[in-house]
Amino acid sequence: MIEGTRLLTMPSGGSFEVEVVRARHPAGRPPLVLVPGIGGPRGTFHHQVRAFSEHADVIATNLNPAQAPAVEPIESSSRDLIAVLDALSIERADLLGASFGSCVVAHTTHRAPERVRRQVWTAPPVVHHGPWRSAFGPGWLVGGALMKFAPENSRGDVARVLAERRIYSVEPDLSQEELMLLAGRVSDTELGPFFRRLAGLRDWDWRRLPEPAARPALVVQGARESAVTPRDVIRAWERLSERPVAVIRGTHMPYLSFPQEFNDAVEGFLGTPEVAG
């Protein structure tokens, strides 16, 4: 597997970039594949790429702007994820998804468990629950629109205002620097695929998944988001993963706002040796 950025064309249509970073000090782990949320920019995982490539190859994926015909967005992205593994000749991987990406990871592991060693569901969405949706507030759309449509020479001012006033309700703890980087990434987000993926979450219900999960799983939530998550959903995650939810500081993007806490929780899971037999 060659290090660098590659443009992959999917069997069902569309193409997108993946970034491959080789392990600096390999520790015998399978590659870690990172699947982003509905906006799709792989760059939101920059802290995780740097941290986890210490001991494993890391592949950060974008999401495909095209959708496979006659299937839902999660299934389409799951097919793309399998196609990425095939294109990079990865027989078995660890998968980490955020928000929409956590649904893609869970679905992929269910349909192809032989391709997965362990899986991490970060900020798994619960869009059917009103208080969970309401926690996003108007700041999600207002902040996102300001970052997407601000001219490049105004992004610094936008990031400063969002950080000072804590407007971006998805993750109000993001620093001005992180918001500046995020603005550069979301400026390329395609709105059609974004809203299609969002609509695709409407019928996803973690409580309906077969228990336990087909491969070992860890759920990571920000504390603010955990506080508005229904208890029956949290219990479903714990039955699926057979372990407590890891709750750290933050809201919906703790991997960006509190990366060290997030990375420590994930490393504790991925770094535990497998038990033979």
Image (cartoon, grey):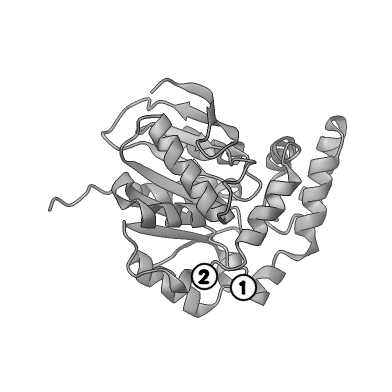
Q: Within the image, what quadrant is residue 175 found in?
A: top right
The reply to whether the C-beta atoms of the residues labelled 1 and 2 are less than 8 Å apart is yes
User: Which secondary structure lies at badge 1?
Assistant: loop
Q: Which residue is mark 2?
A: 205
Residue at 54% from the left image edge and 54% from the top image edge: 74
How far across and down, in percent of the image, does residue 129 sit?
Answer: 62, 75
Q: Position of residue 112 (x, y in %)?
A: 35, 51
Q: Quadrant of the N terminus?
A: top left
Mark 1 belongs to which amino acid?
His
The residue closer to the viewer here, 171 or 84, is: 84
Q: What residue is pinned by disc 1? A: 128
Judged from this view, the residue extending furthest toward the front is 70
Q: Residues within 10 Å of mark 1 (few under 14, many from 20)?
A: few
Q: Is residue 12 left or right of residue 117?
A: right
Is disc 2 surrounded by few (<14), some (14 to 19) or many (20+) residues within 10 Å?
Answer: some
Depth check, front residue: 81 or 166 = 81
Q: Residue at x 55, y 54 (%)?
A: 71
The answer to whether 48 appears left or right of 241 in the picture is right
**Vertical relation: 116 (above or below) 157:** below
Residue 184 left/right relative to 68: right
**Amino acid type of disc 2?**
Asp
Q: Quadrant of residue 195?
A: bottom right
The image shows residue 41, relative to residue 192, as above or below, that is above
Q: Decide if residue 18 is in sight here.
A: yes
Query: What secondary structure is marked by label 2?
Result: loop
Q: Residue at x 68, y 47 (%)?
A: 193
User: Residue 219: x and y, percent?
Assistant: 44, 60
Q: Is residue 165 visible?
A: no
First in residue order: circle 1 vs circle 2:
1
